[in-house]
Image (cartoon, rainbow, N blue to C red):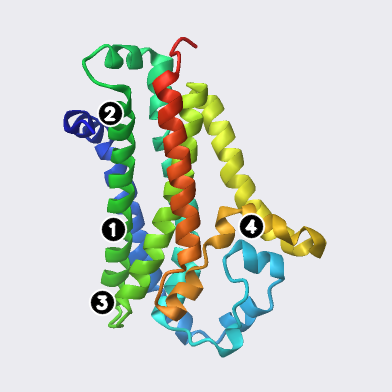
Amino acid sequence: MSMKLFLSNLKLSRWGILAWGILIFLYGILTMYLYPTMTESSLDILGYINALPDAMKAAFGYEGIDFTNMTFTPEAFATLEFLVIWPLLIGIYGIFASISLAREAERGTLDLLLAQPVSRYKVLVSKFSVFIFAALMIAIASLLGLLIGALIINETVDTMSLALVLIEALLLVLSFASFTLLCSVIFLEPRKSLLVAGVFVGGSYIVNFMVPILNPSVSWLRNISLFYHYQPNEIVNNASLDWTSVSVYIGVSIVCFVAAMVIFQRRDLVT
């Protein structure tokens, strides 16, 4: 990796990283701030969630959870209201951030960059490292938001459980970003890259909650959905990572990134 390129790209992305970090930080605080309101409500929130159709439970990451016996802890509330949708929110940022190579190719600035004495793989690694750094900072901001929100309402939370959920969510987002990067070097066009990556992420999300309402014979299709492997509630309950999910996300990320590097090394930049 070229540290000069990394810092240069980081400087270009700093305002986007700052904006996303602040928004997700405030969202975390707001989530915890609402916790007392929900616990003091006369509504049977958990009973209502438990009565939802299976497809809706899967869509919100609630599948397989018996809410009738569940304690409505701050961690559980943070999971239901914040951590379940975190990968989808940050995944959007990851998709747009990972097409920067295609944007530069379209503008003609990538040719100028590669004319410098720097290898292609360093360009690719430096650019993607900026996203990894950004996603990590956003994850830290998320955790800080939840912890500060808990302090505001005088509640204690299991910091380790929340951190483990964010680690797995971060790996899920990384796999989406790696796939988008692969699309970026294949097409070298932002619109095509966004379209394919968007269909992949959106399709993965839809497959996860549509399959349960279809014929049981096609239940195996859920295994191809990356969202299927993300179960934040189980991580909070068990206080441990699901290593199968971790392996899937790391494997997808490595395969897509290596493929992107090989293609970019051989890619004719004339589009």
Name, please, the residue furthest toward the bottom.
69
Which of the two discs, 2 and 1, sits closer to the camera?
A: 2
Q: Which residue is mark 4?
A: 223
Task: State how far apart marks 2 and 1 are (Cα).
Answer: 28 Å
Q: Residue at x 58, y 32 (%)?
A: 195
Considering only vertical position in the picture, is 110 above or below 239?
A: above
Task: State how far apart marks 2 and 4 are (Cα).
Answer: 34 Å
Q: Which residue is mark 2?
A: 122
Task: State how far apart marks 3 and 4 are (Cα).
Answer: 39 Å
Q: Nearer the viewer, residue 30 or 237?
A: 237
Number of residues whose C-alpha sits closer than 10 Å to that of mark 3, classed few (under 14), some (14–19) or many (20 or more) = some
Q: Which mark is residue 151?
A: 3
Task: State how far apart marks 4 and 1 are (Cα).
Answer: 31 Å
- Mark 4 or 1, nearer chain start: 1
Which of the two discs, 1 and 3, sits closer to the camera?
A: 1
Which of the two discs, 4 and 1, sits closer to the camera?
A: 4
Considering only vertical position in the picture, is 122 above or below 218?
A: above
Q: Which residue is mark 1?
A: 141
Q: Disc 2 residue type? A: Lys
Q: Residue at x 72, y 71 (%)?
A: 53
| For the residues bearing labels 2 and 1, Cβ distance under 8 angstroms | no
Q: Nearer the viewer, residue 227 or 32?
A: 227
